[in-house]
Amino acid sequence: VVVLTASKSCLPNANNNREEISMSSLIDEVLKEAGFSDAAIADVKAGKLHYGGSLDAASNKELSVKLAFHVEGKIHNIKHVFLHLPAKKKYDPTVGDLGMIATDGGDGSLEDFAGIKLSPNEVTMDKLYSNAAPGSDLNLSKDEIETFKKLGKKATHEEIENCLRQVLLDRFRAYKKNGLAGIKPYARSKKEFSAGEELKNQILHGPILKKRAPMFHKYALDYPNNKPEGVEESFFWVNSIIDDKPTIALIHRVGMPHGNEGYVYMERHFYLSRSHNCLQGIGAAMIHGDDETVVLYATRTSTDQVSGFGSTAKRTIGNKVMGGRMADNFERARKVLAASKDLSLRNLSLDD
């Protein structure tokens, strides 16, 4: 996730020294509420990234990470990168490709998904989709499974990719129209899994967002209803290579100014084609010096891989592994954001 920031120039008619003291105190309060020690907070303010461990789990399928870090960058550039030019390929080595969806604010089209390819391992992926069934390696609803079955066992790779693009477009439109309630449940061998309910529970389980940004908290639950003033959002897809297989995510990013204090933001993976069920990250960006920001970011990932027998041990190990990986990604992301200070927006692209 790339962060949003705010600078002192956004705060008219305020004394700079008073602003700095007030914002420094706010940073201390919020990070302490999130469980960071005084020493960790001092390190973050000094420019370091601090891995704060995991969150209280919202379910037995959850892996989580919380991070706090310092970022340099101009507000306009960083905000633009977050919402409109998600440069994930520069800091996440698993990302193969990505593309924006419905940049005109509309309902999207198949053309938005033209860049999605089921590669590498085309033969393996073709078999997975042709033989899709409840409880397989893919996250599909019952009717989506039937759609792939209708293609027949002799379906070409192109036909399977086209079918997947239509499934993704339909899921995007359903979510954009009905929010969490519009997310079709995944078919499982015993009981369907609702990513919409999982994402809702993740929001309800985090106390800081409701306390500090109640309007944004409500919008995260009620989307697309009850949209607060000043909210900006965007959608895109990402094709990541996980276990040597393409894994498609549909992503919703939302950002909103929070008074004169900075920004609150969310990244929601409301569909994942395999490996995980869904993901949701919530962050707060708070002013710290001229064109500098301290960021608190917490993410929850739902995956069947850590449920069942030995769930507690699996989640403990998984949290540490994911925490280390995300800390590495955010170190790289900080460099991308710092570089954006000196970049013209016309020189930034999705492939950066």
Image (tube, rainbow, N blue to C red):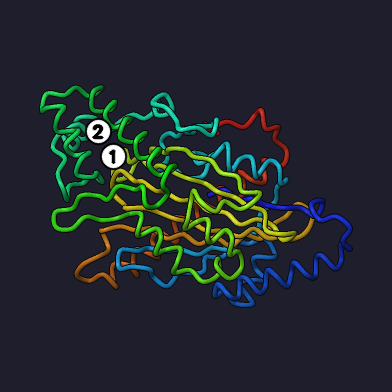
Instruction: Residue under label 2, please give it.
Output: 121
Instruction: Estimate the x, y position of residue 160 in percent, counting from the top left.
Output: 23, 28
Measure the alpha-carbon separation of dots 2 and 1. 6 Å
Q: Nearer the viewer, residue 134 or 337?
A: 134
Q: What kind of element bears circle 2?
A: loop
Judge from the rendering whether residue 12 lies leftward or rightward of residue 259; answer left or right: right
Judge from the rendering whether residue 12 lies leftward or rightward of residue 335; answer left or right: right
Q: Quadrant of the C terminus?
A: top right
Count neighbours of disc 1 (C-alpha within 10 A) and say few if under 14, some if 14 to 19, many if 20 or more: some
* Residue 287 seen anywhere in this rendered image of the structure: no
Instruction: Estimate the x, y position of residue 125 in percent, counting from the top left.
Output: 22, 34
Judge from the rendering whether residue 58 lies leftward or rightward of residue 158; answer left or right: right
Look at 76% across and 51% down and name the residue there: 291
The amino acid sitting under disc 1 is Lys
Up the image or down, 301 lies above or below 132; here it is below
Instruction: Estimate the x, y position of residue 202 in percent, counting from the top left.
Output: 42, 63
Badge 2 vs badge 1, beta-carbon distance below 8 Å:
yes
